Amino acid sequence: NVAEALAQSRHESDATAKEERLYRTSQMTEMEDLQAPYDHPFAPLCIKDPRDYFDSQQANALKTYDDTRAGTEQLSCSLNTEEAYGFLRGSISEIKAMGLSAHMVKPEVALTVINGLTLNISSTKYQLGKNVHESVLDGLPNTTKEELLHAYAKEKVRKLKGSHVKFIRSWRL
């Protein structure tokens, strides 16, 4: 009796341990096709080294700024961390004191920056060494790419239906 009870308890503990092991393994193994659909209104960034991303963005911003200011005075952009932090705190204090009703930047400067950024974004400079024929979507994960294409197609159909109704109404008049 004692031997049978011991063997039975060992068998039950082995089965329980095996179930626990299988459960932990299934929790650690992620299968993309079995995951719930993404309900997030944003696409996740896929950045291998964040320093590379921000360094390249800073370089692009400085180049755009220099391109838009051709022929004007050049400012030194070399600030150490303490100076940059102090400048930021001063700017925030200035905004708190003045409020947001006054112009923080001259409208001409703001227009120049907007035009420069628009030119930079609309050009192919953002591809930085990629194949010219490769689309931005090709660099995204498949699930994100499919969701974007699906949303785009749905919006396109909605717009087409709206323009079709307007055309029919104008034709009947």
Image (spheres, grey):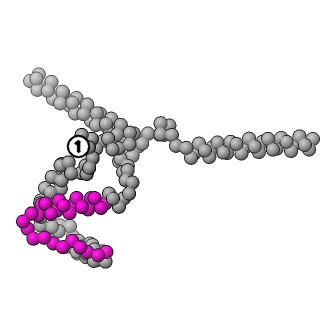
Residue at 67% across, 45% down? 20
Magenta residue check for 59: yes
Query: Residue 90 location, x and y as percent?
Result: 25, 76
Q: Secondary structure at mark 1?
A: loop
Residue at 28% across, 37% down? 152
Residue 16 in which image quadrant: top right
- Check the picture and name the quadrant holding the C terminus: top left
Query: Residue 112 location, x and y as percent?
Result: 11, 60
Q: Nearer the viewer, residue 133 or 6?
A: 133
* Most distant residue in the right direction: 1
In the picture, measured across the screen, residue 144 lies left or right of residue 108, that is right
Can residue 114 be seen in the rendering of this structure?
no
In the picture, measured across the screen, residue 14 lies left or right of residue 132, that is right
Residue at 21% across, 30% down? 160
**Number of marks:** 1
Q: Nearer the viewer, residue 111 or 124?
A: 124
* Most distant residue in the top direction: 172
In the picture, measured across the screen, residue 29 lies left or right of residue 54, that is right
Query: Residue 134 location, x and y as percent?
Result: 27, 41
- Check the picture and name the quadrant holding the N terminus: top right
Can residue 66 be seen in the rendering of this structure?
yes
Q: Which residues are magenta?
A: 54-81
Q: Nearer the viewer, residue 60 or 44?
A: 60
Mark 1 = which residue? Answer: 132
Q: Amino acid at mark 1?
A: Val
